[in-house]
Amino acid sequence: YDKHTQFPESFEAGKYLIYCIGENAILEDAALREMNLSGCNLVNANLQNATLIKTQFKGTHFGSADLSNATLSGANLRGVDLSQAKLEGAKLKGSFYDQDTKFPPDFDCQKHSMLAIRPDEDLSNQNLST
């Protein structure tokens, strides 16, 4: 849910495993596997140790989000600006990026076994399963 979600008066969100998605969200250890978070505002969100396997992030705004030790295997990071995000210890193997994805200075996509999606990219010999 987000800050605009309205619950019935008797609904107690704390009783359920639900997450508020938005700026400054606290999503530490969250299980958001295979979710579609495309276009979300996750500026300054705490996503430490979150499970984000095969999650869609196309166009998501991260700002200074903390993705330390998060698992993003197979995630779609095309067009995402991660230039200010904290990525220490993040597991990015098999995640997808393109020419519009921005990374922190000195970030090495090959070291993290990420997959480039480009019009001329040959993925015929790549294992795309995670």
Image (spheres, grey):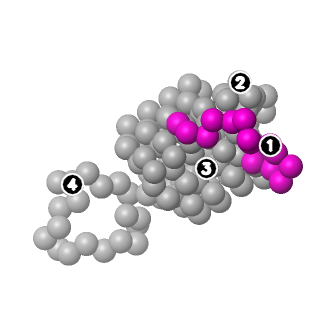
| Quadrant location, the N terminus | bottom left
Residue 99 in sight from this viewpoint = no
Type of amino acid under label 4 = Tyr
Type of amino acid under label 2 = Lys
Q: Specify the quadrant of the image occupied by residue 27.
A: top left
Please report whichever mark, 2 or 1, sits nearer to the chain's N-terminal start.
2
Q: How crowded is mark 4: few (under 14 residues within 10 Å), some or many (20 or more)?
A: few
Type of amino acid under label 3 = Asn
Q: Nearer the viewer, mark 3 or mark 1?
A: 1
Residue 65 marker? none
Question: Is disc 1 placed on a helix, strand or loop?
Answer: loop
- Callouts 3 and 2 close, C-beta under 8 Å: no
Number of marks drawn: 4
What is the magenta range?
117-130
Residue 127 in the image: above or below residue 57: above
Q: Measure the alpha-carbon separation of dots 4 and 1.
A: 44 Å
Type of amino acid under label 1 = Asp
Residue under pointer 1: 122
**Does the magenta-highlighted stretch encompass residue 49?**
no
Query: Which residue is drawn at the image coordinates 83% and 54% (left, top)?
Result: 119
* Of the pair 12 and 89, the residue shown nearer to us: 89
Please report whichever mark, 3 or 1, sits nearer to the chain's N-terminal start.
3
Q: Is residue 52 left or right of residue 19?
A: right
Residue 57 in the image: above or below residue 92: below
Residue under pointer 4: 16
Q: How crowded is mark 2: few (under 14 residues within 10 Å), some or many (20 or more)?
A: few
Q: Which of marks 2 and 1 is in front?
A: 1
Residue 4 in sight from this viewpoint = yes
- Callouts 4 and 2 close, C-beta under 8 Å: no
Residue under pointer 3: 76
Please report whichever mark, 4 or 2, sits nearer to the chain's N-terminal start.
4
Please report whichever mark, 4 or 1, sits nearer to the chain's N-terminal start.
4
